[in-house]
Image (tube, rainbow, N blue to C red):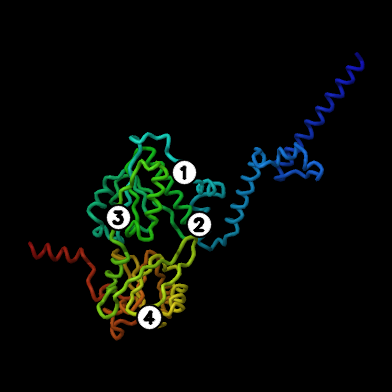
Amino acid sequence: PEFMHRCALTAYALAATCLAVAVLFRTSVRLTGGPAVSPRLRTRGLYSAFRHPQSRVARLRGQYRSERSLEGSIQSVNPGSPDANKTELFGDAKALRKLLDPEPPLDDVPSFALGSIALVGSGPGDPQLLTIAAHRMLEDAEVVICDRLVSKDIRNIVKGELKVAKKYPGCADYAQMEIYKWIAQGLREGKRIVRLKIGDPFIFGRGAEEVLEVKRLTGGRITPSVVPGVSSVFAAPLLGAAALTHRGVANNVILGTGYGRNKSQPAIVPYQDQTTAVFLMAIGRIRELCSNLIEAGYPELTPLLVIEKASCADQRVLLADLTTAGELVEGHKIKPPATIVVGEAARVLFPSEDYPQGLVAQDRLPIDTDSVKFLSQVAISQF
């Protein structure tokens, strides 16, 4: 009996020792992200249980490291740069990481209970340039998800819930994922959703990407409606008195953007005589754009015209060439939304002797863009 008693005590002591070692081992994992284990133990089951890719501790360590990595990349951003907006707009590193996780498909929602969605173009900014279909949809929608640059006058038409995308510089991808989450939420709740996009939905507006996302979320059970908008590609130059295809001056029009995927700079089409180039979303890279155009063969004195906030009450028009545009744009603090027109056609209605480089007063434009005044004059004449 005494021998058995001693054996029992020894067993209890060994069990307690093993338990203490295990507790210390787990604590070291939790505090340091990994244990200090001798090479000999690396081949044994206890260590591999913690290091195996499918183990719970390994998964937690991976998540911890990814969060620390994301947090570090955010904290390393210069507070004065646009990228600093991410944490202010969307939350800390953990919230950003969660935001980038794709929304799961709505397989649990019956088809009859799903909402509907329409991608609607808002035009350049003036509510009078909305299509009739767009105006009706804005009034009828239960949820409107709109771009940040959609004018306030158009936003005021919305009668339902309004969500504004936070697409500031450096935040576009995060804002796009937030848009997808809003869309998924609205479809799940059976809402009538309007995705309101500046200009036309399919001109540098990720419209096709959002159609594909809706199809992914719903398994193809929902087909989004699309309502065209008056694109700034054509409306802004017209409202800035730039004749894109003036006979004898320009018989081609090319379209470009200042930002490609992942903030890349899209390639410039080489210079061609009698061609007008129109650039959207490029005002923030005006100096780089002009430099790239010159490298692509454009003469340095090629006329350049900028239309800021086309069709809105505070529209501004600026005349320059490829050598002066950067300084003039920065000096006059031209901001998005702005459309850039490059080519001889930009100057057809602006003879140099009457229009020096710089801002052109709205009342000195060679055309009248005040549709409200025109309609008022028609009403008075009819009266």
The secondary structure type at the circle numbered 3 is: helix
- The residues bearing labels 2 and 3 have C-alpha atoms spaced at a distance of 26 Å
* Picture residue at 71% right of the left edge, 39% below the top: 50
Say what amino acid the circle numbered 2 marks.
Asn
The residue under label 4 is 302
The residue under label 1 is 103
Q: Which mark is residue 85?
A: 2
Whether tag 2 and tag 1 are in contact, CB under 8 A, the answer is no
- The residues bearing labels 4 and 1 have C-alpha atoms spaced at a distance of 47 Å
Q: Is residue 212 above or below residue 248?
A: above
Number of the front mark, 3 or 4: 4
Q: Tell me where residue 135 appears, x and y as whole percent.
A: 25, 52
Number of the front mark, 2 or 1: 1
Say what amino acid the circle numbered 4 marks.
Thr
- The residues bearing labels 4 and 2 have C-alpha atoms spaced at a distance of 36 Å
Q: Earlier in the sequence, mark 4 or mark 1?
A: 1
Q: Earlier in the sequence, mark 2 or mark 3?
A: 2
The secondary structure type at the circle numbered 2 is: helix
Q: Tell me where residue 37 appears, x and y as whole percent.
A: 79, 43
The residue under label 3 is 154
- The residues bearing labels 2 and 1 have C-alpha atoms spaced at a distance of 23 Å
Q: Is residue 197 above or below residue 222?
A: below
Whether tag 2 and tag 3 are in contact, CB under 8 A, the answer is no
Say what amino acid the circle numbered 1 marks.
Glu
